[in-house]
Amino acid sequence: MGESAAARDVDPAAGTPPSGEPGAGTAPGIELAGVSKRFQLSRGETIEALSGFSLRLEVGEFVAVIGPSGCGKSTALRLVAGLEQPDEGAVRLAGEPPAAIIDEGRLGVAFQEHALLPWLSVWGNIALPFKVRGRPVDEDQVRSLVELVGLTGFEKARPKQLSGGMRQRVSIARALVLRPDFLLLDEPFGSLDAVTRRQLNLELQDLWALRGITTVLVTHSVEEAILLADRIAVVSGRPGRVVLERDVPFDRPRGRDVEHLPEFRSLMDDLTTALDRAAAMTRGG
Ligand code: ADP
Ligand code: MG
């Protein structure tokens, strides 16, 4: 952090992972190396979601991934979460296949489709990962997360009694409850209005920075990416691959004032332009 906002345009022909050479030095936090993923559709058609997708996060790094809708962002996260297998390339967490890390409970996920269980309270939903793994619930840990995400007093409430922002806080607390080393967030603030979203971004940013969890955030908001991430990766239209990476040069904690800095505006402009170009790359509609 604090260094220049270096841009690394990725040469697709070179086949080099944009985030450095695999195998050099210590194992990275999260690594996708030359990953391809195809899905079978009906009548024998296939769809190529990812092709030559490479992204590498150092331990403790927070990377935001932005890209046009349908470019394979969620697919990339599902590969890291071990929910899909790559057709080509490799996915590693701490240098190991995801399954090993997931078995140890070292990966937290907050995906949009992972809804809260409506019949469980806030407390019950946050404690759920312990139950799922057959572990005794660490009450102190649940309590400290309830506090951290600002839900003290709402422990007994059911999801339907909460606002959208509060439900998102519960999802994030649940993803963190097992003290993961790795965190995957797929548009966790996607359904919120702009004001609530920004408020949550500002409030929760310390949580990422302090805990040193290696985090990938998929978002469609360039602003959110800049507020939260150490680095931003732009994904091309389908088949998705990382076409640009930019470091975010702002010190933490980042307040509302950051948005008025000329560097913020120019980073915003650069990334928005890159997103427009990325969208134009989509093959086959
Ligand atoms: P994003 O999250 O960037 O919007 P996704 O990763 O969800 O994109 O999807 C990328 C492409 O792969 C889309 O065209 C989507 O329809 C397709 N896709 C994703 N998952 C599946 C699946 N299980 N079966 C078939 N197609 C899929
Ligand atoms: Mg998605």
Image: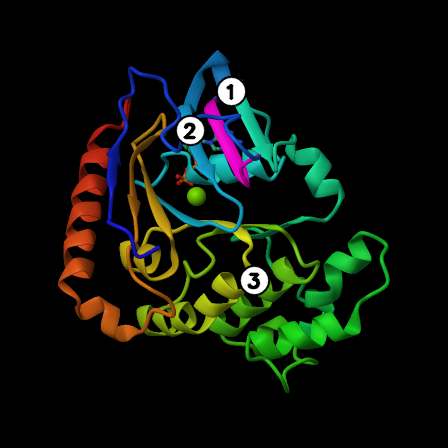
Q: Does residue 218 appear in this view?
A: yes
Circle nearer the N terminus (2, 3): 2
Horizontal and vertical percent position of residue 96: 65, 31
Front disc: 2 or 3: 3
Q: Is residue 17 above or below residue 93?
A: above
| Residue 238 highlighted magenta (yes or no) | no
Name the residue tied to disc 1. Answer: 89
Residue at (25, 68) in percent of width and height: 258
Horizontal and vertical percent position of residue 28: 53, 37
Q: Which mark is residue 54?
A: 2
Indicate left or right for 242 with 128 as reference: left
Circle nearer the N terminus (2, 1): 2
Helix, strand or loop at label 3? It is helix
C-beta proximity under 8 Å, tags 2 and 3 = no
Helix, strand or loop at label 2? It is strand
Q: Residues within 10 Å of mark 1 (few under 14, many from 20)?
A: some
Is ligand 1 less than 8 Å from the beta carbon at label 1?
A: no
Q: Amino acid at mark 3?
A: Arg
Q: Which mark is residue 165?
A: none
Name the residue tied to disc 3. Answer: 211
Q: Which residues are magenta?
A: 27-36
Measure the alpha-carbon separation of dots 2 and 1.
9 Å
Q: Main secondary structure of the magenta part?
A: strand
Q: Amino acid at mark 2?
A: Ser
Q: Is residue 101 above or below residue 252?
A: above
Measure the alpha-carbon separation of dots 1 and 3.
30 Å
Whereabouts is ligand 1, in terms of quadrant? top left
Q: Is residue 37 above or below residue 166?
A: above
Horizontal and vertical percent position of residue 5: 24, 48
Q: Is residue 265 above or below residue 281?
A: below
Q: Amino acid at mark 1?
A: Gly
